[in-house]
Image (tube, rainbow, N blue to C red):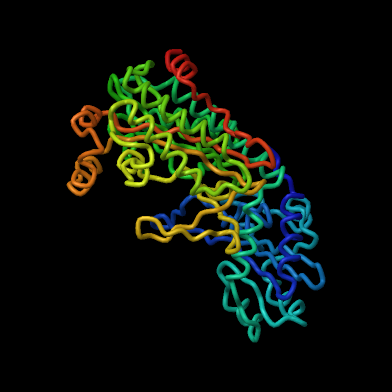
Amino acid sequence: MPLPMKLHANNRRNLMKRLPGGLILLTSAPEVIRNGDVHHQYRQSSNFLYLTGVEEPGYALLLDPKRRAETLFIPKLTQEHAVWLGHIPDLKEARKRFGAKHVAYIDELPSAIRAARKGYKLCHAEGPLPSEVRAALKGLKITKAELDDQLCELRAFKSADEVALIRAANKATAAGHVAAMKAARPGMYEYEVQAELEREFLKAGAFHVGYGSIVAGGASSGVLHYHHNNQKLKQGDLLLIDAGAEMHGYTADVTRTFPVSGKFTARQRDIYELVLAVQKHCIDRARPGVTSLELHKESERVSAEGLRDLGLVRGSTDELVESEVVRAFYPHGLSHMLGLDVHDVTGGKKRRIPVRRNGKLRYHARLEPGFVITMEPGLYFIPALLDDPAVRRKHKRRINFEKTERYYNFGGIRIEDDILVTAGKPKNLTVTPKSVEDIESICSG
């Protein structure tokens, strides 16, 4: 999918309007050594990517709001670089490729700062600043906090171009998840399924994953951030895959849980349909003005009612939610923001709502049109939680421990989609199948 350069030009203009009183300087993320002289795969810093579209190291961006001037600085590379790493773009090519008004070589950055700093007392800066750049900024106050906050607010609202990129990431992600459902069989290893999944990402032109893929079979599906992906799948296992392709920095975040053998058992189907009902209930309520905490409480209520209907817990819905019984089966949050980061910005300090819960200060947001959020309820049977003596003492009358122990080889079920909040009905950007019937049909070939 071609990258829309007008997206980044608009982002630069919007940022300069918000920070008219200082120079704005960002440098690209440095390369990170993996070991010896080998680097990790490069990933640009999200703020720099948001403003430039540049996915390579060695660049810088200088914005001069008073004069409405912008300059992208590109690395001045040698012919030796071309021998080892390929083509070197010149200034004209970089200007066309990235849509910047002015382009110069990076060694001109100090002199450009000296020319632009007249009339300013501060510089909003992010990223590594070499000594010669710091010398050019001497006498200006260098600050990062306000730049971070303004970018946090801007990035929270996704433009049509950004939504299109998230849709493209979701399309590639769906191809991967469907390929994994088709491929998974008892006797395979989790990493073999991961290979089928991520092959489809690459085929779609998504060269990065948004985060490390979770491919968790059997009891490991109850490990929330499982990362080993090295166990053999067995007959009767569930396989939970939490994975998202990244398209030009914008990621999908999708979880599907399906039966390795091709068909849910009655017990698995009961829990799966309960989680799906929770998700559908909450997606429909993802409207402007609702807070993410209110949505999470709704997910706990529907989960509590379903668990009670299955005979796993006892008590009124209010009692089950307020006593936190549900958290023994559902220990994570329902939702988070999504965009250039899988756990994306929350909308700036004006939009953060502090909430004290379980002794910890958490931040959540009131939904607004343009937010893209995940919706990921889950239910798990985790011995480390359900066998915790403190949990047993606290909930001995509310949890049917004799029955929950029969689920210990079950692991867990999570279903996750990516939702665009609009002025009206929310839009689901995820196209990966999730009904019981569709999943069993795909798994069975």
Residue 106 lies, with reference to residue 117, above or below; the image says above
Q: Is residue 226 in view?
A: no
Q: In this view, does 13 lie to the left or right of 25?
A: right
Residue 18 lies, with reference to residue 208, above or below; the image says below
Q: Is residue 430 left or right of residue 228?
A: right
**Residue 113's x, y, as percent?**
71, 76
Q: Is residue 149 left or right of residue 199?
A: right
| Total residue callouts | 0
- Residue at (63, 37) in percent of width and height: 426
- Which residue ends up furthest to the bottom in the rendered image? 139
Residue 74 lies, with reference to residue 117, above or below; the image says above
- Which residue ends up furthest to the right in the rendered image? 67
2 and 283: which is toward the camera? 283
**Residue 227's x, y, as percent?**
35, 42
- Which quarter shows the N terminus? top right
239 and 116: which is toward the camera? 239
- Residue at (48, 24) in percent of width and height: 179
- Residue at (72, 53) in percent of width and height: 8
**Residue 220's x, y, as percent?**
30, 35
Name which quarter of the figure residue 418 lies in: top right
**Residue 153's x, y, as percent?**
63, 58
Name which quarter of the figure residue 114 lies in: bottom right
- Residue at (40, 24) in percent of width and height: 258
Q: Is residue 274 in view?
A: yes
Name which quarter of the figure residue 136 lies in: bottom right
